[in-house]
Amino acid sequence: MIMSEKSKQHVDSCRFCWMCHHICPIGNATGQERNTARARALGISLVNREAIDLSEIMDNIFECSTCGACVHDCVTGWDPVMFTKETRREAALEGKLPDYIMSLVANCLETGNAYGKTTTCDRLTEAIKAHSAKKDTLLLLGVDAKFMVCEQALKAVKVLDKAGVDFTLLENEPASGGQLDFLIGAANETKEQMENCAKTLNEYKTVVVYDPNDSKAIKQLYKEYGVEVNAQVVTYTSFVAGLIKEGKLNTKNSGEAVVFQDPYQLSRDLEETEPAREIIMSYAVLGEMLLNRAETVWAGNILMAQYMPEIVKKVASRRIFNATSVGAKKIVTASVAEYASLKAVAEDVQILSLEDLILGE
């Protein structure tokens, strides 16, 4: 397998190190050594030494969420996410991706989303038509909200409507490239999808990005890929927090106690932790889980649930256990993917989005 010298160095450093052993949300959920950064590095090193074939480790390579908890926790600066994504790219180039990943990649290339969806729910279709006129501000919903959790996309639209924001929604919204980056890393197809998205975004003065995964892609990864965005790109959380400060949204604190699930894309990658908390404290009483902000624990997503649903359920259940351990009865999310993941397994707790708080739903 062709791998950069930098990644090889990180692989060889990680393969005998257990320092982030405790931090992987998937490893903690499965209890299996294979789901640790160390084990993944060991497998890659065996491929690099031609002891085994690349195809033998690919299931394990795609069991990583790339949440970056291991990277954040490493005091010596090693980066398991980097060599995991590079291995995915090389597997794509060598034609050794698992069939279940190839189908997701094919969907991304054909339809712009890994789910192969081409239509959304009727009510969102109507909302998009109602906001089809070209304005200075674009609300980018993202593929998860638009195709998989339509009711949350509608709530995101309702919040901006309630605040009197003049904005555009796109019927043929471009994919950010975030899903392809996860599946095949820095491949040409990923960059092409990002460039296509940037071209559309640059037609607007301001782009409000609803999904944290898209926010990470556009605000961080595009720079790494050399893709330029001239529009002002803001996260949905920071934009809505600004609307509250400007008095464009009426607030009333219900007195209900909640905790917040930080999306790692916002808290670790973009270093944004406070806007969501400002929103929550306008409508409820905010408590904190023991692991919050940059220390947050990934709570699952929709994409990985397509090929390892039971493990994603275990991940979400463990995060709910983290919440109930501090007495929480309500968890607020700012990620449509984590909302769906937590909602699928929640029994003794209530899962809410920021939009639920604002709209009183």
Image (tube, grey):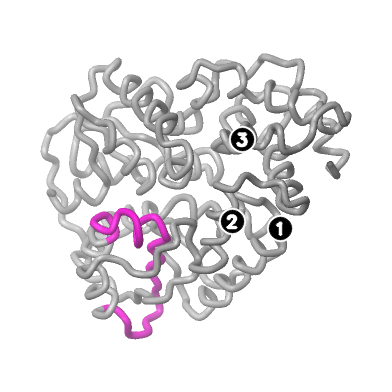
Report the mark closest to the observer, 3 or 1.
Answer: 3
Q: Earlier in the sequence, mark 3 or mark 1?
A: 3
Residue that carries the numbered disc 3 in the rendered image: 59
Residue 326: numbered disc: none
Q: CA distance from mark 3 to mark 1?
A: 19 Å
Query: Foreground: 284 or 66?
Result: 66
Q: Residues within 10 Å of mark 1 (few under 14, many from 20)?
A: some
Residue that carries the numbered disc 1 in the rendered image: 187
* Image coords of residue 278 (percent x, y): 31, 43
149 part of magenta stretch: yes
Q: Amino acid at mark 1?
A: Ala
Q: Amino acid at mark 2?
A: Leu
Residue that carries the numbered disc 2 in the rendered image: 180
252 part of magenta stretch: no
Quarter of the image for residue 322 reads top left
What stretch of residues is rendered in magenta? 131-153
Q: Secondary structure at mark 1?
A: loop
- Left or right side of 8 for 113: left
Q: CA distance from mark 2 to mark 1?
A: 8 Å
Image position of 53 with respect to 120: above or below = above
Q: Residue at x 28, y 46 (%)?
A: 279
* Quadrant in which the N terminus is drawn: top right
The answer to the question of whether label 2 and label 1 lie on touching residues, with beta carbons closer than 8 A, is: yes
